[in-house]
Image (tube, helix red, strand yellow):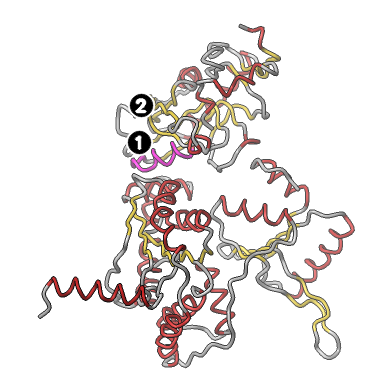
Amino acid sequence: MTDSIERVLFTEEQVAARIAEVGTEISEKYRGRDVKLIGVLKGSIFFLTALARAITIPVKIDFLAISSFGGASKSASRGMVRIAKDLDEPIEDEDVLLVEDIVDTGLTTRYLLQTLAGRGPRSLGICTLLDRTVRRIVQVPVDFRCFEIPDRFVVGCGLDHKQLYRNLPFIAVLKPGTEESLATSASRKSIP
Amino acid sequence: MASPRNVAQLRLLSLVTLVNCKYWMALLTISGEPASRWEEVAHGAAQMLGFDLVTESRLRQWLNEEFGETAIPEQAWRAAAASLLARLATSHHLVIGLDGAEHLTRSMPLVLRVRITASNAMRLGNVMLDERMEKQEAAAQLAVLDAEAKRKRKQRFGRASAADFDLTINTAYIDPPHAVEVIGAAARRLSEQGLLSAAAASEIQFDMRLRLARHGIAPAGVAHVKRNVFGHPSEEMFSHLLDFYRIQWDYEPRSFPLQWDKDGNVTEAFTPDFYLPDLDLYVELTTMKQSLVTKKNRKVKLLRAIYPHINIQVFYQKDYQDLVFKYGWKAS
C-alpha cells in the first residue's frame, strides 16, 4: 500500500505530539465545562479518537455524515452538500467543537457550521487535523489546528484515497499520478 | 358595496391598464430580518440576474449626487429615495437590497418583493458565527440589531402597515445560494418585460418631489448608475474578494484635492480605489513598479496630513498577492 507514497509529511510521533498539544489547549479553553466533539464521518474518526483521549475535561461525542448531491451537476461542483447522517442528540446549550480531518475550501465546513449554529449551541468551534488554507474560498474560523499543509493530496490518519490509506499512522503525500484518479474517487475529499 | 367578483374584475382591469400603459419594470426588492442573510441573497440575485444592486451605501452616494450636501431628514428619506429609484429604473434593472425596500416601491406596479426570514435560532446562530460570539452574547447582540432595525424603519416609514410580499423565503430551509435560484426563477420574466416607462417615472417623481418640497428639499443634480470600469484587473479581483465576504464597497467614489494654485484651482488630487462604508475605510491598491509606488506613497502621506480624519489603507503588491493566492485566484 505504501508504494504509492511519495513522502511522509508528518510522522506518527509528530502527529501524536501535536494532537496532545491541541488536546491540552482545548482542555484549557473549556475548563469547567463539558465539551461535545462532533466528528464528520468518515475522515475524522481516527483524529477524533486520539483527540478525545488527549482532552482532560469531560467529553461527549457524536457524529455527522455528509454527502454531495446532484451527481456531476453544476451544484455539486460548487460544493453543495447535505447531511446524510444527522446527530443522535440535540446540541442546545452545549459547547460544541466540530472535529474535521481537513479544512480545505471551507465550503463544507461553512455549511456544517451554519447547520449546527441554528440548533442553539452555547458555543461553536472548529478543530481540524489539517488546514489547507491555500485552497480556502470561504473564510471559516478555525479555533484549533494541528498542521497547516501545502496544496498537495495527502492521506493517512483518516484521510483516504479511494477509501484506502485511512489507517496509516502518519500523514503522507501521494506520488504524482496516483491522485489523478481523484475524479473517480468516491472519497469525501471530492466534496470541497 | 363592491362584491368580491367586482373587486376581482377591477383588479383584472387595472392589470390590463398597466399592461397597455407599458408600466412593466424590472425591479426586485429584497429585505428581511437582521442576521437572516438577506444581504447575501440580494447580492447573489443581482449577480445572477445581471441587475444593478442598490445597497444602503450606494443609495446614500446617489442621494448625495442628486440632492447635494443637503441633509435629508429621515421623514423625507422615503420620498427622496423613491423619486431617485423611479428615475433610475427607467434605464436600469435594479435589485433593491435595503431594509424596508418593500415600502419604497409601494407606488410602483409589478415589482417583485421578496422577504427573507429565518428562525430565531438560525439568526442567533448566524450572529454567533459572524461575530465569533457565544450564545448569550450573541442573543444580546441580536436584540440590539432587531431594535436598531425597528427604530430605523419607524423613522423612515412612520407607522407604515406591514407590506405585502410576493415571495417569502425561509433560509432555515432554503439556504442563500438556493434562495437566489428560487428568486432568479421568479424574477427572470421581469427583465423580459422591459424597464419602467418614462411616463410612469414622471408620475412617481411628481408625487415624491411634491412631498420633498414640504421639507424644502429640491434636487441639485442628477445621480447616475455608474458601471464600475476598473482601471486594473487587480481592482476587479479585489472587488470579488470583498463580495465574497459581503463587505460593501464603492469604487473610486471620491477625489481628494491635494494641491492648489494661487487662484485656488486644484492642481493635484488623489482618488483612492475603494471605499468600504461599513468600515469607513478607503483602500488603495498598488500592484505596480516601485517608482510608481513611491509616487503613490507620497500622495497617501499628503492625504493623511491634509485630511487626518480620513482612514486609508494601502495594499502593496505583496500583501495583495498573498491575499489573492490565499483565496485561490491567480494574481494578475
The residue carrying mark 1 is A94
Q: Where is residue B228 in the image (x, y as percent from the top left)?
A: 65, 64
Q: Looking at the picture, which amino acid does disc 1 mark?
A: Glu
Q: Could one spot residue B93 in this view of the protein?
A: yes
In the image, residue B144 above or below residue B196? above
Q: Within the magenta stretch, is there residue A183?
A: no
**SS at mark 1 in the image:** loop
Looking at marks 2 and 1 on the same chain, the residue that comes earlier in the sequence is marked by 2
Q: Measure the alpha-carbon separation of dots 2 and 1.
A: 20 Å
The residue carrying mark 2 is A85
Who's the residue at 46% across and 30% down the image? A71
Q: Where is residue A102 in the image (x, y as percent from the top left)?
A: 55, 28
Quarter of the picture holding the N terminus of chain B: bottom left
Q: In this view, does A64 lie to the left or right of B325?
A: left
Question: Which of the two marks, 2 or 1, is nearer to us in this view?
Answer: 2
Q: Where is residue B72 in the image (x, y as percent from the top left)?
A: 49, 83
Q: Which of B154 and B145 is in front in this view?
A: B154
Q: In this view, does B101 lie to the left or right of A149?
A: left
- Image disc number at residue B257: none
Which chain is indicated by disc 1? A
Q: Looking at the picture, which amino acid does disc 2 mark?
A: Lys
* Magenta span: A110-121
Q: Which of B240 and B10 is in front in this view?
A: B10
In the image, residue A128 above or below residue B264? above
Q: Position of residue B256 (x, y in %)?
A: 73, 75
